[in-house]
Image (cartoon, rainbow, N blue to C red):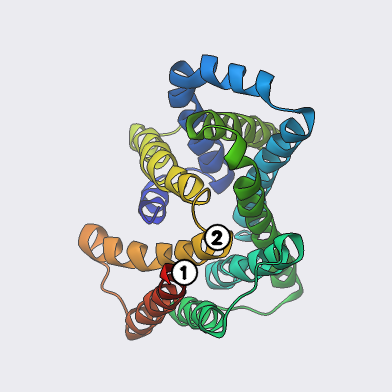
Amino acid sequence: MSFASIFIRLAGAPPLVIAAYRMTIASAVLLPIASRKSIKALKELPRADLLILLLSSALLAVHFWLWITSLSYTSIASSVILVASHPVFVAIIAYFLWGERLTRLMILGILVAFVGAVLINYGGFTLSPTALLGDTLAVVAAIAMGAYLIIGRHVRARIDFLSYVTIIYTCAAVFLLISTVIARHSLFGYSSKTYLMLVLIALVPQLIGHSSINFAVRFLPAVFVSVAILGEPVGATLLGYFILSEAPTINEVAGGILVLAGIFAVLKRHSR
């Protein structure tokens, strides 16, 4: 998943166009492989689960849409930090839905990881009425991601993995394509390098990275999976050093250590 930041940096297209291509290409790869299996799975699911799948797809699309839109109003740092708050919303939702309680070690791990994420992006915050709008969009995007993970854990027990991601990605792609048209962004006319990056975004961080998250959420608590996602900026920092020759700052190194320590604390508690 950490490769997403690198490929987005190298792609010369509006963020919403990148998100639309990301989901569209990913679903285009899956449909020839799993379309029959997905249709069969849809026929066997009760109507309530079909609505849940549609809601999950919409939440994923909303997450990408609002988070990317927030970058136009607030700083990258503010947006990233607020979006990184989704483990808190996952913990709250999981507690009220299933009574999943957090131990002190897990709470400490979430806090430490979040502080690390703040430290990585320290220095890029902005305060203004426009930034407030962007921050609000980022928070709603975080809530959407939290709800998406919770729903995924709920419905993944009754549908096979390949059918699940095919349906989710395809529906999310439709939502994002419609959003791109509404925003009046062009889907064509970009450089060959940009289209290459769009393909790589769909194949690597989406099909491999994000699909791994969808696979894991069936076997692990949604809180743990949500916290593990906070490792994405740490990986992106390392990849930025090796691929783009961008040396990490002291804040990024210290923040990365805290993020990994927080993830380890939650993992250690779960392994028990």
Residue toward you, 216 or 178: 216
Residue toward you, 75 or 111: 111
For the residue labelled by badge 1, is the local secondary structure a helix, a strand or a loop?
helix
For the residue labelled by badge 2, is the local secondary structure a helix, a strand or a loop?
loop
User: Above or below — where is 70 with respect to 21?
Assistant: below
| Quarter of the rendering containing residue 143 | bottom right
Question: Where residue 214 sits: x, y (%)?
Answer: 51, 45
Residue at screen point 56% across, 85% down: 104
Question: Where residue 29 sits: x, y (%)?
Answer: 43, 25
Q: Amino acid at mark 2?
A: Pro
Question: Where residue 93 sits: x, y (%)?
Answer: 72, 63
User: Above or below — where is 53 with respect to 35?
Assistant: below
Q: Amino acid at mark 1?
A: His
Number of marks present in the image shown: 2
User: Above or below — where is 185 with respect to 41?
Assistant: below
Which label sits on residue 270?
1
Residue at screen point 50% across, 57% down: 220
How packed mark 1 is, by other alpha carbons closer than 10 Å (few <14, some 14-19, many 20 or more), is: some
Residue furthest to the front in view is 272
Q: Which residue is mark 2?
A: 221
| Quarter containing the C terminus | bottom left
Residue toward you, 244 or 239: 239
User: Above or below — where is 159 with respect to 38?
Assistant: below
| Quarter of the rendering containing residue 251 | bottom left
How packed mark 2 is, by other alpha carbons closer than 10 Å (few <14, some 14-19, many 20 or more), is: some
Left/right of residue 223 with respect to residue 266 in the rendered view: right
Which label sits on residue 216?
none
Residue toward you, 186 or 39: 39
